[in-house]
Image (cartoon, rainbow, N blue to C red):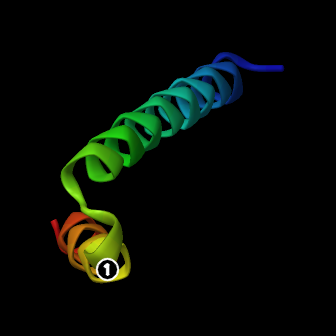
């Protein structure tokens, strides 16, 4: 395995771990912010803004 492949792999793993952790934080934030009655609409609005951002 050459250095660039190794570096890319570890960078991908780092990104994968960070994005998973970030999604957990976002999920927790959404769960605490959104009320149950508006949960679906709230999820759609927040996830859309995240993807557009």
Query: How many numbered discs sit on the rendered protein?
Result: 1
| Left or right, residue 43 beside residue 42 | right
x 56%, y 28%: residue: 17
Position of residue 2 relative to residue 32, above or below, is above
Q: Position of residue 27 (x, y in %)?
A: 40, 47
Position of residue 5 relative to residue 32, above or below, is above
Looking at the rendering, in which quadrant would you find the N terminus?
top right
Mark 1 closeness class: few <14, some 14–19, many ≥20 residues within 10 Å? few
x 66%, y 16%: residue: 3
Looking at the rendering, in which quadrant would you find the C terminus?
bottom left
Q: Which residue is mark 1?
A: 44
x 69%, y 29%: residue: 5
Q: Position of residue 32 (x, y in %)?
A: 27, 44
Position of residue 46 relative to residue 18, above or below, is below
Q: Position of residue 20 (x, y in %)?
A: 53, 37
Q: Position of residue 51 (x, y in %)?
A: 29, 70
């Amino acid at each position: 395995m050459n250095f660039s492949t190794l570096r890319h792999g570890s960078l991908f793993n780092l990104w994968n771990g960070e994005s998973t952790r970030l999604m957990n934080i976002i999920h927790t934030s959404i769960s605490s912010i959104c009320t149950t009655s508006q949960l679906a609409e709230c999820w759609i609005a927040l996830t859309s803004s995240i993807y557009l951002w």
